[in-house]
Each structure stands twice: as structure tokens, then as C-alpha cells.
Image (cartoon, helix red, strand yellow):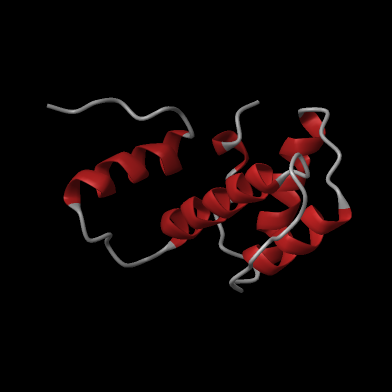
Amino acid sequence: MTLTENLPGTADADALYDAFTLWTTGQGITLYPAQEEALIEIVSGANVILSTRTGSGKSLVATGAHFAALARACAASTPLRSRRWSRRSSSRCATSSAPTRSA
């Protein structure tokens, strides 16, 4: 299952966290405590500076931040600024598949 297939359809912090951790568990990844704490803050809308050692999973936290941003964009009721981005994000939100290139 891809990460975008786990988009919850809401910007609720608990739903975002649960969807992301469901995906990581499905990938065989166990989050470190620092990752869990950072992700909780990120899905709650807080800004986070994660300063941990090399190989501690900062990139996975960044992936979680992108996931939360995409879920918020999909759940937003206002149109996105760019028509091009709007078409792409709409297709991701509705079908949860990779975007197709439009002419």
C-alpha cells in the first residue's frame, strides 16, 4: 500500500498520525520516540526542529510532514492558488494514485 492510499480525507491530527503510523507499520518500520514526538507536533500544526544523530530517521519525519501537508491540501475547502497544482492534487486526493501529466 502506498502512503497516498492512506490519506484520511480529513486534516484531523489524530487521523493523520494514525494513517501515517499505519503506513509505517505496514512497511515494517517502528518509529523511534523522537520520531513519534516530532510527528505528533507536526500533525498538530506545530513547527518542529528535529536535531538528532545521523541515521535516526529525520527523513521519515519529513515524509510525515509532507503527508500531513498533502492531507491538509486535500481536505481544504478553498481552491489552491495554482490551477496546475489544483488538478494534480485533486487527482491524488480523489484516486490516491500517482498524478498523470497533463498537456
Out of 28 and 9, give the one closest to the viewer.
28
Give percent across and percent down for residue 49.
64, 66
Q: In the rendered view of the protein, which quadrant contains the C terminus? A: top left
* Of 94 and 73, the residue lying toward us: 73
Where residue 37 appears, x then y in whole percent? Answer: 79, 63
In the displayed structure, would residue 82 be above or below residue 76?
Answer: above
Q: Is residue 102 left or right of residue 77?
A: left
Which quarter of the image is occupied by the N terminus? top right
Tell me if residue 30 comes above or below residue 79 in the rendering: above
Please name the residue shown 72% across and 37% down the image.
23
For residue 81, which quarter of the picture?
bottom left
In the image, residue 86 above or below residue 80: above
Residue ID at (41%, 38%): 92
The number of numbered discs placed on residues in the rendered structure image is: 0
Indicate the position of residue 90 as horizontal and vertical percent values.
34, 44
Q: Residue at x 59, y 45 (%)?
A: 63
Spot the residue most to the front: 53
Q: Say left or right for 27 vs 61.
A: right
- Picture quadrant where residue 4 is located: top right
In the drawing, does residue 102 fall left or right of residue 52? left
* Front residue of 23 and 12: 23
- Left or right: 14 as drawn, with respect to 62: right
Where is residue 57, by image quadrant? Answer: top right
Residue 98 placement (x, y as % from top left): 42, 27
